[in-house]
Image (tube, rainbow, N blue to C red):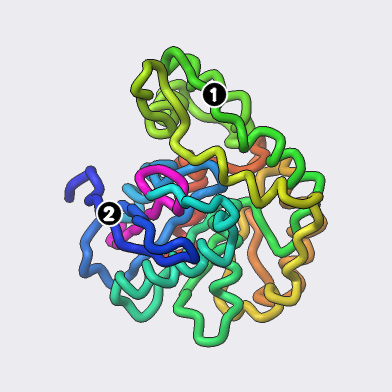
Amino acid sequence: MSKIPREHAFLGLGPGGFHRVAYLEWGDPDAARTVVCVHGLTRNARDFDPLARALAEAGCRVVCPDVVGRGGSDRLADPMGYALPQYVQDMVALIARLDVATVDWVGTSMGGLIGLLLASRPKAPLGRLVLNDVGPFVPKEALAQIAGYVGLDPTFRTIDEVERHLRLIHAGFGRLSAAQWRSLARTSSRPRPGGGFGLLHDPAIVVPMRASAPVDVDLWDLWDRVAAPVLVVRGADSTLLTREVAAGMTRRGPKAEIHEVAGAGHAPSLMAEDQISVVRDFLFR
């Protein structure tokens, strides 16, 4: 089996017209199980390379999109479109394109919220749901902290500088090897025409977040409607998914299972073998 993913794209539709959404596909396209992995706010599909490779080797078809404004996908002309309704609409189009009855979903942070919104709808085509360090309640303080760095658009002289930046702002990923941090630096940046490197997301994704004062995100009513089995992976030091919210997720709605990752905050990388094993075992249960 090839260890290199296949590159695809489709057209999403928003208020400003059509936009290209890129995605990677791993494994056998005719596999019995399709897993969709969706990244966090400033991240991209390549974050899931280790997990996708492992799931493909286990017999899955794995699809990892670049949410619009990230990675190889288009940037929106109107940045106010960078919001969950547009992301959900694009992911519905992706699922339809995959031509399967159901998909399993692995979502980190923003990707988990997209999965939660989909799973809460009647007749949702989601089989099993993995939420990586996100839940139905996100405190406004955590959102304000994220908004503080997301809109930055630095130019880095070298890949070493990119790596140092990522190690700082994504310390919550937890314990990664030097090779893993270097890989993230390469897959999180691209050369700029005038020299140096820039990050692989539109800095304007922060515009809707800064358009009004941060407020708590409360989706408990949607959580109570989720019927799919849910695994929650939580960074032990996370301030976005608090221990109290995680505990509530085990008592309400689908009564999720919790796996806590020591030494991680927001959000566990899902690159370590023990984390990959937890996700794989849940999906195949």
The residue labelled by disc 2 is 26
SS type, badge 2: strand
Magenta-drawn stretch contains 64 = yes
Q: Earlier in the sequence, mark 2 or mark 1?
A: 2
Residue at position x 46%, y 48% in the image:
69
SS type, badge 1: loop
The quarter of the displayed image where residue 219 is located: bottom right
Question: Which three-letter amino acid code belongs to the residue tagged 1?
Answer: Pro
Question: Which three-letter amino acid code belongs to the residue tagged 2?
Answer: Trp
Q: Is residue 12 above or below residue 57?
A: below
Residue at position x 29%, y 76% in the image:
99
Q: Is residue 275 above or below residue 19?
A: above
- Which stretch did the figure color magenta? 58-73
Q: Does 240 sit left or right of 160 as displayed?
A: right
Residue at position x 22%, y 51% in the image:
6
Residue 51 picture location, percent across and down: 40, 48
Q: Is residue 249 visible?
A: yes
